[in-house]
Image: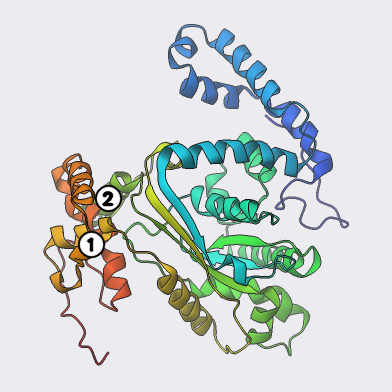
């Protein structure tokens, strides 16, 4: 277990939730290269046969390889520069194209609170970071729920990559309130004190059905710190201070689409879904290694102070995310396959190669999951058109008229 962790103190009120500082990096990395659980995880993935037959040897080999990889890394920036090489290779081998829009409209010297739709556990902020890296800008601090941090070594790796911890496991209203006040204070300090940008998802959990939406409770949490300090401050003033910028990410194909369909199907048929012990880690690996087709990242514009309620802020974030979301042929083909809202399918956006690739992927989906698989791709088309989302097994609402 990793032992080199900063202690909370009056001088560092966010020590237990913030990313690591540069002076902590070397010690954390030294411990990680000797962490048995991490080494076992690496060998199961890279040396599966050797890890079964000779676990001690495979662990020693993994430790040597890890020490070689992090040799000379003394800062967070150096750690992320090592990651950038892997990110470049991932994009080269698992995407057909990665494009961005809107970043040139944002001041490179200003920190922003990027709030985006959430489709992949690790890749959504990773693509934001990569876009910033390519533009020569500082990367973001990433909000990550403590439900994903079941192992100390996972926590350490995330905090080395500038992640800070969002409390979701606190029990009791008083404990949750204190935890969210601390989180709100840290986020405000990052933006207004450190001038360091942040990325966070617009709601807890990925949008598994293709319907993106901002949770107003997140807006309330963000503004807690300013409004506790100045009870006369309006919500709009607190929002403007944080410089919220909506971000939309679109994947032509989601490597976790079958897993998401399985979860949606289980919730519909059984009323519950039991997540496996290592399922989140498996989803992270699948997202990184799986083919994604084209990926589009769109940065919106900073929110003003013209808001009086969290619902209004959430609605504006949703508007910008929806406006920036790129529809791909996979979305139109899914709607066509469902036989729903045929008038929204644009044949001019679909080539024979697109259709062949889509049908090949669909053929690999278990029959009972196909409607749920199609739904997550079809719903963004309906969202863009202002139509209600499609839900398998439900009576679909009539389409809105043009007047709406």
Left or right side of 109 for 156 = left
Q: Residue at x 62, y 38 (%)?
A: 83
Q: Is residue 341 visible?
A: yes
- Categorize mark 1 by other alpha carbons within 10 Å: few (<14), some (14-19), many (20+): many
Q: Residue at x 71, y 78 (%)?
A: 241
- Compared with 182, 22 (above or below) is above
Q: Residue at x 66, y 36 (%)?
A: 82
Image x and y of residue 384, in percent: 32, 73
- Categorize mark 2 by other alpha carbons within 10 Å: few (<14), some (14-19), many (20+): many
In terms of sequence position, does the residue under pointer 1 or pointer 2 come before the other?
A: 2
Q: Is residue 282 visible?
A: no
For this rendering, which residue is in front, 3 or 202? 202
For this rendering, which residue is in front, 315 or 156? 315
- Compared with 306, 319 (above or below) is above
**Disc 1 and disc 2 in contact, CB within 8 angstroms:** no
SS at mark 2 in the image: helix
Q: Which mark is residue 242?
A: none
Q: Residue at x 70, y 52 (%)?
A: 17
Q: Which mark is residue 332?
A: 1
Image x and y of residue 254, in percent: 35, 49
Mark 2 sits on what residue?
261
Image x and y of residue 257, in percent: 31, 48
Left or right side of 210 for 53 = right
- The answer to which image quadrant residue 379 occupies is bottom left
């Amino acid at each position: 277990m990793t032992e080199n962790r900063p202690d909370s103190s009056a001088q560092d009120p966010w020590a237990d939730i913030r990313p690591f500082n540069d002076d902590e990096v070397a010690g954390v990395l030294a411990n990680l290269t000797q962490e048995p659980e991490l080494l076992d995880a690496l060998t199961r993935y890279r040396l599966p046969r050797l890890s079964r037959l000779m676990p001690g040897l495979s662990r020693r080999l993994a430790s040597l390889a890890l020490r070689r990889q992090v040799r000379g890394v003394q800062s967070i920036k150096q750690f992320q520069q090592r990651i950038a090489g892997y990110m470049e290779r991932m994009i080269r081998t698992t995407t057909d194209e990665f494009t961005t829009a809107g970043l040139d409209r944002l001041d490179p010297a200003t920190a922003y609170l990027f709030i985006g739709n959430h489709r992949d556990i690790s890749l959504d902020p990773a693509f934001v970071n990569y876009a910033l890296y390519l533009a020569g800008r500082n990367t973001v601090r990433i909000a990550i729920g403590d439900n994903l941090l079941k192992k100390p070594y996972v926590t350490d790796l995330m905090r080395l990559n500038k992640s800070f911890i969002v409390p979701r496991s606190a029990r009791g209203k008083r404990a949750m309130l204190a935890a969210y006040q601390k989180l709100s204070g840290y986020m405000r300090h990052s933006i207004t004190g450190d001038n360091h940008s942040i990325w966070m998802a617009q709601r807890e959990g990925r949008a598994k059905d293709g319907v993106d939406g901002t949770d107003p409770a997140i807006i309330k949490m963000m503004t807690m710190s300013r409004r506790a300090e100045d009870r006369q401050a309006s919500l709009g003033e607190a929002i403007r201070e944080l410089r919220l910028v909506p971000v939309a990410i679109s994947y032509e194909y989601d490597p976790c689409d079958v897993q998401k369909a399985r979860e949606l199907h289980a919730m519909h048929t059984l009323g519950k879904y039991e997540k496996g012990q290592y399922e989140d880690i498996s989803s992270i690996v699948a997202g990184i290694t799986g083919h994604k087709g084209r990926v589009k990242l769109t940065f919106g514009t900073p929110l003003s102070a013209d808001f009086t309620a969290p619902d209004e802020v959430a609605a504006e974030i949703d508007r910008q995310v929806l406006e920036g979301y790129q529809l791909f042929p996979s979305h139109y083909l899914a709607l066509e396959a469902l036989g729903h809202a045929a008038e929204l399918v644009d044949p001019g956006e679909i080539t024979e190669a697109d259709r062949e690739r889509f049908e090949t992927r669909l053929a690999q989906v278990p029959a009972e999951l196909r409607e749920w698989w199609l739904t997550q791709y079809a719903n963004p088309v309906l969202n863009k058109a202002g139509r209600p989302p499609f839900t398998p097994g439900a009576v679909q609402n009539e389409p809105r008229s043009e007047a709406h």
